[in-house]
Image: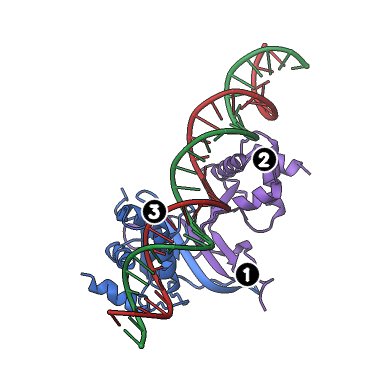
Chain colours: A purple, B blue, C red, D green
Amino acid sequence: MEIKETDKLKKHQLSITDARKKILAFFLQTPGALAHADIEHKSGTEFDRVTIYRTLQTFVEKGIIHTIPTSDNSIRYALCKDECVTGHHHDDHVHFICDDCGTTYCLDHVSVPKVKLPKGFKAVQTDLVVSGSCNKCEQ
Amino acid sequence: MEIKETDKLKKHQLSITDARKKILAFFLQTPGALAHADIEHKSGTEFDRVTIYRTLQTFVEKGIIHTIPTSDNSIRYALCKDECVTGHHHDDHVHFICDDCGTTYCLDHVSVPKVKLPKGFKAVQTDLVVSGSCNKCEQ
DNA sequence: ATTATTTTGCAACATAGTTGCAAGGTGTTA
DNA sequence: TAACACCTTGCAACTATGTTGCAAAATAAT
């Protein structure tokens, strides 16, 4: 089933390559988010580390994936909703990181409340990151 | 004016050392947040890199500073409010990162709204990170 | 002042991320 | 579908970031 990947790449004006198809497939298969290291492990020695870095960068630029801020120095990436295009992300939903299993969820149906900022501060992006225990890890 | 630093270290049950006093002083002098690299540059060759890493870790554990999640793989640290103690942070305020000048602000007076999570998800910590342009960088 | 405990610096290592360049693959045009 | 231009990949080398063990130095306790 490569059609889905190819389609998505075309829609975002990217040429079709093995690396991009495979890496995009990982995201389509994964409900949560992925870090660079996850992809490196999943793909084994198939691609060079550098290729993965560059592919992720390209995907972010083209609006295919977005980054999720964390406190542990590991950038995670997750698929954008379809409306994201080059240079314009619309991912103001809530992210949940489970402290037990480490899974990162995009909670699409929980929306980020608007916050009132002090005078002179202009918000471009708002990230709400909740951490705790997820529905699989609760006792 | 070393009294302030010494006092704060004592209050958090830490022994008084040069590195801790100096690094704590940087935080007391800075309105925003600091990354490891900032401290390394500020202190020059006075302390070993390892000492800075360990000091920051200790400060986080003892509730003197807290980490701020970012999307760019650079952990930033900021002073906690006085109520934080070992293993118990109470820093549910909003953080603002300026895309222009890079300054990170703790917006103490903007509180993080409670979010409703799906069934089975339990929140332990909530981080709201807003990015955009700050009151010094707006046109 | 002496001792026990912590903290520091050093060295070595491990991981993460970047850049330049040549070789190979992709897309385009005729 | 062949030839070309352009983009992407892999490699090598490098920089930055973070960790661990251990001996020496500093701090705290007696």
Q: Which residue is mark 1?
A: A100
Give the camera-side residue of A125 and B91: B91
Residue A92 placed where, x, y %? 53, 58
Q: Residues within 10 Å of mark 1 (few under 14, many from 20)?
A: few
As drawn, the label of residue B37 is 3
On screen, D17 above or below C28? Answer: below
The answer to whether A26 appears left or right of B102 in the picture is: right
On screen, B95 above or below B118? Answer: above
Give the camera-side residue of A101 and B122: A101
Q: Which residue is mark 2?
A: A47
Give the camera-side residue of A15 and C5: C5
Please tell me if label 3 and label 2 are on a single chain: no
Label located before the other in sequence (2 or 1): 2
Please tell me if label 2 and label 1 are on a single chain: yes
Q: Mark 3 to mark 2: distance in Å?
A: 31 Å
Q: Is residue A7 visible?
A: no
Which SS class for mark 3?
A: helix
Residue C10 placed where, x, y %? 41, 54
Q: Quadrant of residue B40?
A: bottom left
